[in-house]
Image (cartoon, grey):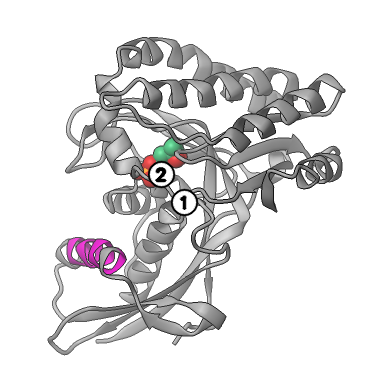
Amino acid sequence: MSGKATVIAPSNIAFIKYWGTRDEERVLPFNPSLSMTLTNCFSITTVEHLDDEGADEVFQSGRGGVLEAASATFAARVEEHLERLRRWAGIGGRFRVATENSFPMGTGMASSASGFAALTLALVRALDREVDTAELTVLARRSGSGSAARSVLGGYVIWPAGDGDEGGHAVAVAPAEHWDLRDVIAVLDGTPKLVSSREGHRRAPSSPYFERRLELLPERLDRVRAAIERRSFVDLAPAVEEEAIDLHLIAMSSRPPIFYWQPATLRVLAEVRRLRTSGLEVCATMDAGANVHAICSARDEPRVSEAIEGLPEVGSVIRDGVGAGPITVQEHLF
Ligand code: PMV
């Protein structure tokens, strides 16, 4: 039997970050993480299962939205996950896959969380399998991009560290409608990511501050959870910023060190602090890259966007916000 399905899965921004992998094969983190699923930054992926023998085919949307053969590195990561899912499903045959991101490539926006969540969900739908959400988050995580587990769900999502060999599955702690937070993403020019997050996870435990961060995290996670529950921006802001700084502190003190920041990163961080001091509900976080995510209330989003867009160091701004999670669509990419 052959089947075809297309899924749109959004990216997510972590308030408490996954940084450090205790089991690379099973993709098990050292610490729990908590994120907000986005809306406008997404991947759309079509998967078709074909009964005949032969190689999997992977296409990526290139210039002008025309599908072209994916780059060798990207295709290899996708094929590895297809093979894993073929084994999980206990089937033969091959897959044809096409994927497109809503945000431009080379902007330093990680597409692995949305991309692997979309790939996993589209494949499961193409095979017409009934799989519960908990297992879907585990299948997405096994892609190697652990944060993909959180993109399977909408709203505010926690991925526990778990213990033992299996680890935990991601669960939503609040739906998107609970709190309309926005994410104004300052895309900084010339930000090639020199070290992958996979390599960053490997190096993290070599930082002399790694253990200390793990000790501080349970209390910080509680603060973020409570702030979300109460929709309290004043409580959320310091916890989110402490956490973002800690991730980069671990990266910068890993052996060998990793510097994701650029001078423009500091410029945007200073602007976010200035805006908060002037009374706006805004705070900053960064993933494994130079871009700054200004998390803000819906009320203050227009003023935050305007201020960040006005900085000469900022290449462009993506305006995003909390979203309801992946959807299956009827229009396929091929
Ligand atoms: O899921 P990965 O392996 O791409 O790692 C994600 C790492 C961060 O984006 C920095 C943090 C996170 O939890 O999203």
- Magenta region includes residue 84: yes
Q: Which mark is residue 59?
A: none
Name the element at disc 2: helix
Q: Which residue is mark 2?
A: 147
| Mark 1 C-beta to ligand 1 under 8 Å | yes
The three-letter code of the residue at mark 2 reads Ser
The three-letter code of the residue at mark 1 reads Ala
Q: Residues within 10 Å of mark 1 (few under 14, many from 20)?
A: many
The answer to whether one can see residue 3 in this image is yes
Contact between labelled residues 2 and 1, with CB atoms less than 8 Å apart: yes
Q: How many numbered callouts?
A: 2
Q: Quadrant of residue 292?
A: top right
Q: Is residue 282 left or right of residue 164?
A: right
Q: Quadrant of residue 286?
A: top right
Q: Which residue is mark 1?
A: 110
- Magenta region includes residue 210: no
- Asked whether 44 or 192 is in front, the reply is 192
Quadrant position of ligand 1: top left
Please provide percent x and percent y for residue 84: 19, 60
| Mark 2 C-beta to ligand 1 under 8 Å | yes
- For the record, the magenta segment spans 74-85
Which quadrant is the C terminus positioned in?
bottom left
Please provide percent x and percent y for residue 135: 32, 50
Residue at the image position 66 percent from the left and 45 percent from the top: 186
Please provide percent x and percent y for residue 105: 50, 63
Residue at the image position 53 percent from the left and 40 percent from the top: 290
Residue at the image position 43 percent from the left and 52 percent from the top: 113
Please provide percent x and percent y for residue 298: 80, 42
